[in-house]
Image (cartoon, rainbow, N blue to C red):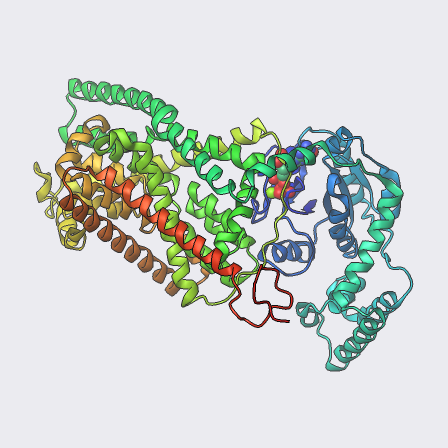
Amino acid sequence: MIFALVGNQNSGKTTLFNTLTGANQRVGNFPGVTVDSKTGEIRRHKDCTVVDLPGIYSIRPYSAEEIVTRDFVLEQNPDAIINIVDATNIERNLYLTLQLIELKIPMVVALNMMDEVRGNGGTVDVAKISEMLGVPVVPISASKNEGISELINTLISTAKSKRLPSVYDFCAPGPVHRCIHAVSHLIEDHAQQRGISARFAAIKLIEGDLDFSDKLNLSENELHTIGHNVQEMESECKMDANAALADMRYSFIETVCLAAVVKCSESREHKRSVKIDSLLTNKYLALPIFFSILILIFWLTFSVLGSFLSDLLLQGIETLTLFVDTGLKNYGINPVIGNFIVNGIFVGVGSVVSFLPLIIVLFLFLSILEDTGYMARVAFVMDKILRKIGLSGRSFVPMIIGFGCSVPAIMATRTLSSERDRKLTVLLTPFMSCSAKIPIYAVFCAAFFPKHATLVISGLYIFGVVVGILVALLLNKTVFRGKPVPFVMEMPNYRMPSIKSVMLLLWEKAKDFLQKAFTVIFVATIIIWFLGSFDAKLNFVDNQSNSLLASVGKLLSPIFAPLGLGDWKVTTSLISGLSAKEAVISTMSVLAGTTLDKLDGVLATMFTPISAISFLVFTLLYTPCVAAIAAFRRELNSLSKTLLIIILQCSVAWICAFAVYRLCHLLVSLNTTLNIFDLLILAAVLVCVVLAVTYIIKQKKKGRCVGCGSCEGCLSPCQNKKK
Ligand code: GDP
Ligand code: MG
């Protein structure tokens, strides 16, 4: 049996899915986390499969996730629908429930978050709701594991007996009622042939869903009659068809809630959220608070906690490498094989694995921010800024996910309803610095800027965001002209982060990272070791600069020479970074033939502090990795566009690295008494001052009458207000 899990965003679908199946899917306290469907077996009921679908508010094809959910329910014929309803927000959630009932598929309503309702002194008359809706209703709390076994039993019995919803008509007699009946009658045969409920199809046609007139194969004549019916209804109701249908559904929901729901005045969670929001989304404080939190997190990760743990792990790995090396030598193993094991595998993979703690610590903090519901606020605060570059706050969710990994971030753009916003966001997300780049930052900061690690790394993250914004701005004025769609996102109440879901996320991250280290990076390391140890005639070379790899690197290094990165070893590691960004460091270690602790010294011979900055900027901005390229290809569905993106990213990276490299040189040559950090900080402060002044001037201008002629409704204080 197949059960489809359908409900509003943030209603607890994934939490219920995890509870039912024992799976570890990602739960987040902000909308748009689940973007494609996930399937799992119910525990102790191996013949029952649940499908976790993306959250939707109605079955209308507004966004990709609505289409995924609608098509699954209509075309995969699930045995029953589990409609999860957030009981703390019952009116809005029931809107979807009514639409689902019209589908005439066996259905059970799971009334979730009952713990919060009860905690606030509210009650729900479950029997009454069930009677009025004509479907079984089970009160549950997915996160507290309450009511789950009852839900499973009800679900199985409903699916087995194929019990259909017993009430369909939510409509009081009147024009809407008449119209639905007339249209259902007209298309009954077509709908029956396609196995779709006639009433559901009729409502879709009245809503003007063009997909449905195609699906049902209607004749011109029939379409004309339907149009006529709809027009008649609209003129009688004095509103358009969609509004009339929404009005019909909400009137019914109102009746249900009046009869069955006792609301608490205002929930504690909501009161608390409003209080916290007055500070965190305050007009002036919101952004400074957000950036301070980010910098605090980076500091804790890269200078205190994460780096301490990483060092510890590194020592362990080095001891192991030394132990294996001595062991192999004592055993008298073939030196080429010994070199392969120690300098290929241990050095390459080991150098990457030692960064695991940094990544775990960073994600511990980020997932706490996300799970409390703070990230949803940041999306809201960012909306205003993003709108200026032609995006909406919705695009912020993929951007934040991009700090973890570009691949899910590119997938998360599916939540955006306009194709233009989506493409622009896909282009933008890879500029957000992903976690795979952390090892590179850590190694370079330790080698060149040990005292300024937090500053450099925060700077890189912010620089990525700024470049992304500039690129978006440019594209918005050229290729992607247009306006972003309005931003509507639910602000969830602040919740204590659940330890389980934070741990799950960390485990996922660690697993992904280790998997990558032992697969992609392992293979890349072996290839690099091989190419770096043999020449074109497959002779083992003593001096790497005669190797195959050196010839390839030397071929490409002129491109990077203007960035101060002309060394063939640097070029090679940048190329191997295309397989996965962690491979940049593993390649450097293999090429340097040394473990991480001694890499500093080798790096100092390959880079100056300024070329190190140029290198960091280039790695920050160029194409993330093959997995991301595959994701571009999948989401944009075009090879040529994917190639264009790669060219765009590499060019942007090259230009920025070149600009930074030249600028730093210029600054240093201008003033030798100041060190490069003072100068960078000075530059940043100057930029901030210029931005602030332009902003203030703009605001001032807004207040003055510019003689636009539309003074009538204008509220700005204006001396020469024309009448
Ligand atoms: P989805 O967007 O529908 O998949 O929702 P999620 O499963 O990601 O959950 C959204 C938020 O609601 C998370 O913060 C959960 O911890 C929380 N949540 C889910 N179920 C319950 C519940 O029964 N009670 C309470 N208090 N919180 C819940
Ligand atoms: Mg979800």
Quadrant where the C terminus is found in the figure: bottom right
- 618 or 520: which is nearer to us? 618
Residue placed at 64% from the left, 68% from the top? 712
How many tags in the picture?
Answer: 0
Quadrant assignment for ligand 1: top right
Counting from the top left corner in percent of width and height, residue 179 is at 84, 69
Q: Is residue 259 above or below residue 203?
A: above
Q: Is residue 711 above or below residue 362?
A: below
Residue placed at 56% from the left, 35% from the top? 371
Counting from the top left corner in percent of width and height, residue 339 is at 17, 30
Counting from the top left corner in percent of width and height, residue 591 is at 17, 37
Outermost right residue: 173
In this rendering, position of residue 530 left or right of residue 354: left
Outermost front residue: 719
Counting from the top left corner in percent of width and height, residue 113 is at 72, 35
Residue placed at 48% from the left, 39% from the top? 290
- 375 or 702: which is nearer to us? 702
Outermost bottom residue: 221
Residue 722 visible, this orientation:
yes
Quadrant where the N terminus is found in the figure: top right
In this rendering, position of residue 332 left or right of residue 176: left
- 295 or 440: which is nearer to us? 295
In which quarter of the view is residue 433 placed? Answer: top left
Residue 27 visible, this orientation:
no
